[in-house]
Image (cartoon, grey):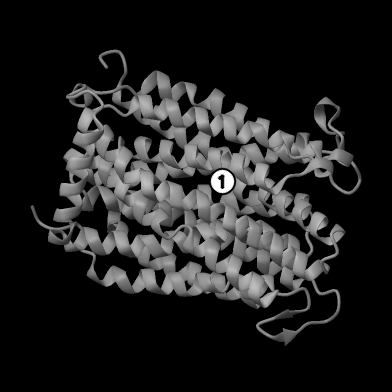
Amino acid sequence: MADVSLRKRIWGWYFFDWASQPYNTLMLTFIFGPYFAQTATAHLVADGMAEGAARAQAQALWGYGLTVAGISIAILAPILGGIADSSGRRMPWIWLFSALYFIGSYALWWTAPQDFSVLWALFFFGIGLVGMEFATIFTNSYLPSLGPRDELGKISGSGWGFGYAGGVLALLLMLALFQAGDSGRTMAGLEPLFGLDPATKADTRVVGPFTAIWFAVFMIPFFLWVKETPADAPRLKYKFGNGMRELKQTLINLPGNPSLLAYLGSSMFYRDALNGMYTFGGIYALGVLNWSITEVGIFGIIAAASGALFCWLGGFADRALGPKPLIIMCCLILMGTAILIVSLSPTSIFGIALAEGSSLPDIMFYVAGMLIGAAGGVLQSASRNMLTRQGNTERMTEAFGLYALSGKATTFLAPALIAIASQISGSQRVGVSPLIVLFAIGLIMLVWVKPDGEPE
């Protein structure tokens, strides 16, 4: 550590957010998610299903796939966190899950429409998602070591903003160089690079290898500058039993820390609702507003740019006010945004009919995207910092494992509720309405959360 300054260590930590954000931006929300829905819908229609029902069924399939990944993460996150804390080492785990991120995303190149497999696509997407989520748990646990407590909100917000900026740049490059529009050319007026054929959707499927390579390149600063500190030196060999015993003791003691318990419960619901917004936003625009993937991508640029700006500003607000007021404000904004989204159709807003061909629904969805980007980014950054105030600094990886558990214990709930509501109603608009309830539950549970945690 002698040759790595704290400033470099902080910037190395920022680079994880920069490197990993495209999985959320390109894969989950704005490019591959809509591509999956579009391709699955086409196959269902070819099998004789009505188009409206096929779109709802495709949304349901996406939801079920994310449900399985979410359950896997929920079960393993606190266990791996406990084992890592018992050994005092996190970096080997980050290497392992970075490899899963790379493999899972790269493999999505092989999802061409002509031989498209729902199971193949969901399996490898899930592998990459698991890799990203677990790597995030271990990198987040370095946050308390990056500065004094009063500065962690600013550091967290700057890191998240830097990550959003990476997502914006990656999405711009994808749309400018690879993704063809209706004209067969990219947003920059070019033919897709490397002769990628839009007829086989190669211009869209390349998002998998692009995301994998982006991650591999930009993780280099992280691995160079973020090292295990002397306090992280191995205390024990990796022993499953030690990690499990200490995790069990943490869970037994959890009711004795009611603020942490309430916070984990609250964040479980509001983060699940936010993830549902991210996960289904592009699919919703594609199916309800009849947007193209390029239009969804432009929407993504606006949302991510808004997120980058407000994450940075939110870091200063966090330093001045603390994370709890920001979390409350963001949840209220996102709940209102969810209500707006459910009310939108190509011909109406809040049930009020519009003139034929009106662009107002599209405009309002762009506004919704800006609100999701801004409030969602600040919410995630403030939530990450809030945990440093609630958790045990000696068991921070385990704390972030529990945080991931609380986030993933119901991460399957939002996709599952959306999948079930979409399938039963046959409507994508009705399908996303459970998000409103999840935000409301999260807000109510914040009442029992102390801004600075329980006194020691």
Q: Is residue 356 visible?
A: yes
Q: Circle 1 is placed at which residue position?
A: 24
Picture quadrant where residue 448 is located: bottom left
Image mark count: 1
Taking 61 as reference, is 250 left or right? left
Q: Is residue 187 visible?
A: no
Above or below, comparing residue 3 to residue 36 in the picture = above
The residue shown at (40%, 46%) is 157
Estimate the x, y position of residue 406 in percent, counting from the top left: 35, 56
Picture quadrant where residue 318 is located: bottom left
Taking 282 as reference, is 54 left or right? right
Three-letter amino acid code of the residue under disc 1 = Asn
Above or below, comparing residue 375 to residue 437 in the picture = above
SS category of the residue bearing label 1? helix
Estimate the x, y position of residue 3 in percent, counting from the top left: 30, 13
Give the residue at the far bottom of this rendering.
Answer: 352
